[in-house]
Each structure stands twice: as C-alpha cells, then as structure tokens.
Image (cartoon, rainbow, N blue to C red):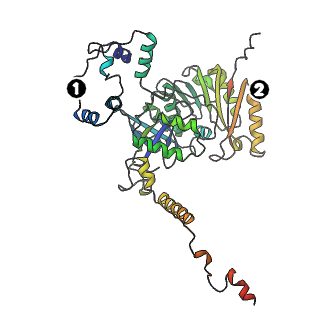
C-alpha cells in the first residue's frame, strides 16, 4: 500500500472496524486524532461528499494480536463503539490506540502497563486521545489502581505471564461486570515451553473455567504469531432462561 | 430532526422556463405524451412535477403512513452508529466501476451479495504520503491515478496477464487452416512409417 494509491473503505463485520480494499486489503480503524500516526503506520484520508474529512489508520496484524484474532475469524471481539475496556499489558500503546479508535469518543480504555520504559510511549499516546487512561502499575495488584478504573464491559489481556489466568481473574473480580466479556491472548512459550502448545492452551482454558469464566471460542493467531491462541468468552454469565411452558 | 421540518414546510414551485430541446424532441417523436413522461425527471424532495403541486405549493400528504414513508426517504443513508455513521456515497459511474472491480476479485460472491454491493457504504480514500517513506514506499507522479480502476489497469503485471490471456483465447479460436496437414521435419510422427522402411 504505497502513498498516494487509491483504496475503498468499507465497514467490517465487527463494529467500529473497517476494511480498506485496493491492490492489497487492510484492516483499518477510524482515526480519533486525524493527522497523527502512532507508530508510523499508514493512514488513509477520505473526503466526504459534504466536505468533511475523515482519516483511517491501517491496523497491522503482525504487530497487534487483536487484529490477528479478527483476521483469524473470531466471531465477536465485544470491543465496539461506546464500550468500556480494561486493557492489561498495554506495552507502548500500539494496539491500545486502535482499541481507542474502535470504542470512539463515547468509550473508555484503561490501559495497564508495568514497564516504565514502554509506559512512557503509552502516556505520550494517551495525551492526544481523550478516551485512553494510562495506568503504570502491576496488573497483579488491581487494588493499587481500583480508584482509577470503573466497571468495564470487556477485559483484554495480553500479559504473557505464567499466571496470566490468575491475573485476569483478579482484575475481573474487581472491575468486570457480571455478563461482561474477556479476550485473552495466550503465548504458549511464556507459560510452559516443555509441553506442546495445544496442551498449554487446554490447561489455560481449564484454569479460566474454574474462575467463573465461560470461554466461547478459541482461535489460533497462526500466520501472524507462532504458538499463540486467542480465547474469547464471558464472565459470570446469567443462567439461560428456560422457555415458558 | 431537520429532515422532518423539511417535509412539513411549504415549498415554492420553481418558476423554470420549459427547456427548449425537450419540446423539440416531443414534437419530433410520434407519441409525444409517452416520450414527455419519460423525459421528465422523477419527483425528488426538492422538485415536484406540476401535477403534484396544489396552487403551486407542495402539501405534505394527510396519511401518516405516507408521511412516514416520505420521512424515511429523506433520511441520509449511513452505515449506522456502530460504524460512526459512515455515509453512503452517491453511486457515480467511477465508483461503480471500482466496486465491480473489487467484486471481480471475489469469485465466491453470489447474487445476493452482488446486490448488496449496489447499495454499499463505501468511501474512496487515498493513502497518505509520509515524509519518512523511502522511495519504495511511494508512488511516482505518473503512477498516481484518480480512481482505483485506473490504478489497477495501469499495473504492468495486470497488463501482461491481460495480454497473455487475450493471445491465448485468440489462438484457441483461430481456424485451423492447412497447418494441420503439414509435415514438420523428418523426425516427426507423420514420417514414422517412412522411417521404418
């Protein structure tokens, strides 16, 4: 996708996400801060018929596990315009910036990152985006940032720690509403590099099930990441109503 | 809602003189009334034909269902709040060509999806040139084209493929002629019998 080439932007199946079609296709999100790229990604400028200008940013699946999951064909990411999202393991904020694009001005993204070095980039990104709240804290201790975060609809977790299921459960017990959803990316090597990846994914899903999580689906991020899986599910899901007799 | 006000308010009949060329065509053709009705543009929210005006004014219909229908027609078509109200574009011939080209990229598309394409919410965008791009990431002035269709057609790889396909089809369709009966060289299949003796 070279600078100056023409593309056609269409809505994607997932809410708040778009596709740019041209010589090559790309996943894009509507830029909250027109004229600014976060990590030197390509941008697409569109002029509407009424003269207003809109800008989209290309979402690279090799740099973002959420984009990889979308291209992997996940049924529902639950992150949509107006949603409140808790993002664990925000790193430099590349994916966070796209999540902030997806939820739009009515949504909120609480981005938690422990590392000060990458947290610096995260804070710089959040300066320009009003719906991102950066939190430089350890995700293992949600009590430390409980005053900053309200109840959220979705938790996205990309922490790549051996105890990531426990971290997710701890944060969900504090912030995730009953009937909310979670999206977790599992890197098999980070949990146990001695057993095959499928066994690791299975054991992680088992751990999640013990913590009141209900996994709906699991997709592999295969062409983009090696031995990664993305699990999507619900938290404290309400019991299904029986059909009236 | 501004659209609802537009319906209830009165609209003046535009005092436009009849276009001369239109009357000429009607006089020349045999069945004047038929061609005239075809020539007249359809009534829009801005312009109504004379028969629908009352004393030169547009009155909204009394029937609430008809008013609702009129209102629905005037609401701008968008992709919905879930996609930040992306507006539907007017389907210009250029845009239509682009969409058809994209469709031809997807052979699995069935009739229903092709129909969806007709009222697609799509915007034409340009990839922003970045100053940090190296030469390989930029297009030359000559390579830049106004539409996607032009861009795809000017691609040398596509042009080569098109040329090869045309040549293949032409070769396939060419009548055989006497080439079929010619013996091409001494070591051919047709000389086999002579070689044996």
Residue on which disc 2 sits: A210
Measure the C-alpha gap from mark 1 to mark 2: 77 Å
Give neighbour class at mark 2: few <14, some 14-19, many 20+ (Cα, 10 Å).
few
Give the residue drawn at x 56%, y 22%.
A149
Nearer to me, A8 or A151: A8
Residue sticking out furthest to the bottom: B197
Q: Are marks 1 and 2 in contact (CB under 8 Å)?
A: no
Task: Tell me the subunit letter for badge 2.
Answer: A
**Residue at 58% from the left image edge and 75% from the top image edge:** B179
Residue A49, given in percent of the width and then of the height, sits at: 36, 33
Residue A45: % across, % down: 40, 40
Foreground residue among B194 and B188: B194
Provide residue B115's location: percent of width, then percent of height. 53, 35
Residue A167 seen in the figure = yes
Residue A12 picture location, percent across and down? 54, 35
Which class describes the residues within 10 Å of circle 1: few (<14), some (14-19), or many (20+)? few
Q: Nearer the viewer, residue B126 or B105?
A: B105
Single out the mark in the foreground, 1 or 2.
1
Relative vertical location of residue A144 with respect to residue A117 in this rendering, above or below: above
Q: Secondary structure at mark 1?
A: loop
Q: Chain of mark 1?
A: B
Residue corresponding to mark 1: B16
Dividing the picture into quarters, in which one does residue B41 lie? top left
Q: Is residue B57 left or right of residue A12?
A: left
Residue A115 appears in the picture as rendered = no
SS for dot 2 = helix
* Discs 1 and 2 lie in a common subunit: no
Vertical comparison of A7 with A163: above or below: below
Q: Residue at x 65, y 33 (%)?
A: A184
Q: Which mark is residue A64?
A: none
- Identify the image quadrant of the C terminus of chain A: top right
Q: Residue at x 61, y 82 (%)?
A: B184
């Amino acid at each position: 996708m070279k600078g100056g080439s023409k593309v056609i932007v269409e809505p994607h199946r997932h809410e708040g996400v778009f596709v740019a079609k041209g010589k090559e296709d790309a996943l894009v999100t509507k830029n909250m801060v027109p004229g600014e790229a976060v990590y030197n990604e390509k941008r697409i400028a569109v002029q509407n018929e009424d003269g207003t200008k809109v800008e989209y940013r290309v979402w690279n699946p090799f740099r973002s596990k959420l984009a990889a999951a979308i291209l992997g064909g996940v049924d529902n990411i639950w992150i949509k315009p107006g949603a409140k999202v808790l993002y664990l393991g925000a790193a430099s904020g590349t994916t966070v910036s796209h999540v902030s694009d997806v939820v739009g001005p009515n949504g909120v993204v609480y981005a938690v990152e422990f590392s000060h070095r990458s947290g610096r980039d995260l804070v710089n990104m959040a300066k320009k985006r009003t719906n991102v709240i950066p939190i430089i804290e350890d995700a293992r201790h949600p009590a430390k940032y409980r005053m900053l975060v309200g109840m959220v609809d979705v938790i996205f977790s990309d922490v790549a720690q051996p105890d990531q299921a426990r971290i997710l459960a701890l944060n969900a017990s504090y912030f995730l509403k009953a009937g909310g959803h979670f999206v977790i990316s599992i890197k098999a090597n980070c949990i146990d590099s001695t057993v095959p990846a499928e066994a690791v994914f299975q054991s992680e899903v088992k751990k999640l099930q013990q913590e009141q999580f209900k996994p709906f689906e699991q997709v592999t991020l295969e062409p983009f990441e090696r031995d990664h899986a993305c699990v999507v599910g619900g938290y404290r899901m309400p019991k299904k109503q029986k059909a009236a007799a | 809602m501004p659209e609802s006000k537009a319906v209830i308010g009165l609209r003046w009949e535009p005092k436009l003189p009849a276009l001369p060329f239109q009357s000429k065509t009607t006089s020349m053709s045999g069945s004047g009334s038929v061609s005239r009705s075809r020539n007249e543009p359809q009534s829009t929210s801005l312009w109504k034909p004379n028969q629908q005006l009352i004393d030169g004014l547009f009155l909204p219909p009394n029937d609430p269902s008809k008013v609702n229908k009129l209102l629905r027609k005037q609401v701008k078509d968008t992709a919905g709040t879930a996609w930040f109200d992306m507006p539907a574009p007017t389907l210009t011939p250029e845009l239509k060509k682009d969409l058809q080209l994209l469709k031809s990229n997807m052979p699995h598309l069935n009739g229903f999806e092709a129909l969806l394409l007709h009222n697609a919410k799509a915007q034409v965008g340009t990839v922003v040139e970045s100053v940090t791009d190296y030469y390989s990431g930029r297009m030359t002035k000559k390579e830049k084209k106004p539409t996607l269709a032009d861009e795809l057609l000017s691609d040398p790889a596509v042009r080569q493929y098109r040329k090869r396909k045309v040549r293949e089809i032409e070769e396939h369709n060419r009548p055989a002629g006497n080439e079929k009966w010619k013996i091409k060289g001494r070591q051919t299949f047709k000389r086999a019998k002579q070689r044996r003796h």
